[in-house]
Amino acid sequence: MGNILEVRDLNINFQIDEKYYSAVQNVSFHIAEGETLGLVGESGCGKSVTSLAIMRLLQETTKVTGTIDFKGQNLLDLTEPQMRKVRGNDIAMIFQEPMTSLNPVYKIGTQIGESLLLHKGMTVKQAQLKAIELLKQVGIPRAEQIANEYPHQLSGGMRQRVMIAIAMACQPHLLIADEPTTALDVTIQAQILDLMRKLTADNKMSTLLITHDLGVVAEMCDRVAVMYAGRIVEEGPVRTIFHNPQHPYTIGLLKSLPKIEGERTRLQPIEGNVPSLRNMPAGCRFAPRCPHAMEVCRTEDPSPALVEDAHEVRCWLHHEARSEVHV
Ligand code: SF4
Ligand code: MG
């Protein structure tokens, strides 16, 4: 199985008042064909920013370095017109709040057809028919009628189905889903996840699923990369990460999952706050919140270490170099 996406040493620096601040630092990951990778972390950890960098949708003033190989081509080298051929065609994206990405003044059918006109050279008539077919595929009843309606006439769950129809329209090889179910209630959330799982499997698509919800990761992903303050701190197969987490942050995240105890649901938040972009701690960025922080953690940044097959951790506790640094 080849890799459809390979991100290497991605660095993203935002310009604020003439200065640059590091939002994402040395992030590397890959997604194999047909695989779903979960990118998980608290809000502001850089996961959405990473996906926007892949889509080349960040502001011009933002400095992006590294490589983003998609099917063997570095997306960072493409011109804007070349990138437009990739966006929505080869790589599609769905966001948390469909209302902000749907255009309120165009009919549903027209919005689904748009990328088919742009990328597939269809006529308006062909695009309309295909739009109706796609609405049926995403489980929307009365598809012919809905195609003629406007976004505000639909429920949140139906709007997210429409977004999925738009994303699927050109049969992309990679789907990026950024918190696709966060705005939905639990029942609808489960239905949308089911739908995504079925469609990506049927179409042999690879998926980058961005979420803060480990429950969603457990249900949907093959592998998971845990992000903290702009860095990937742990990465591995989902089963491994859930059963044998090694990074103190991942352990904290898993502990914060609600546990059903009799009738009570208990949440255990990780103490402390995510550091701000303007004030990143030196060394390991998790050190101010880490119960195991050592002296070396506050000055030196651990590099990723392989702890077992396909399982990498960025923490001095799992570093052979630790002893060398201490003596
Ligand atoms: Fe904690 Fe140190 Fe590991 Fe960072 S490197 S997670 S501070 S033990
Ligand atoms: Mg986000």
Image: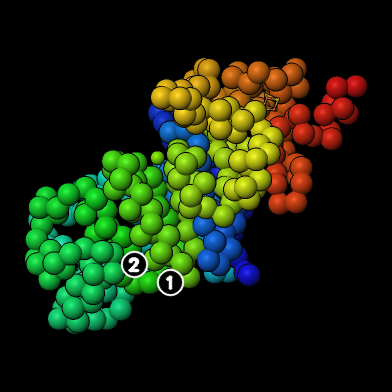
Q: Answer above or below: position of 203 versus 289.
A: below
Residue 69: quadrant of the picture: bottom right
- Can residue 47 be seen here? no
What kind of element bears circle 1?
A: loop
Across and down, in percent, residue 162 comes to 24, 59
* Residue identifier under label 2: 168
* Residue identifier under label 1: 203
* Model colouring: rainbow
Ligand 1 quarter of the rendering: top right
Residue at the spot x=50%, y=46% of the render?
A: 217
Amino acid type of the residue tagged 2 in the rendering: Met
Across and down, in percent, residue 210 comes to 45, 46
Nearest to the eye among marks 1 and 2: give it.
1
Residue at the spot x=58%, y=45% of the render?
A: 225
Dot 2, how many residues are within 10 Å of its Cα: few (below 14), some (14-19), or many (20+)? many
Residue 317: quadrant of the picture: top right
Q: Is 169 displayed left or right of 156 in the figure?
A: right
Q: Is 168 displayed left or right of 327 in the figure?
A: left
Across and down, in percent, residue 62 comes to 44, 43
Given residues 161 and 103, the one toward you in this image is 161
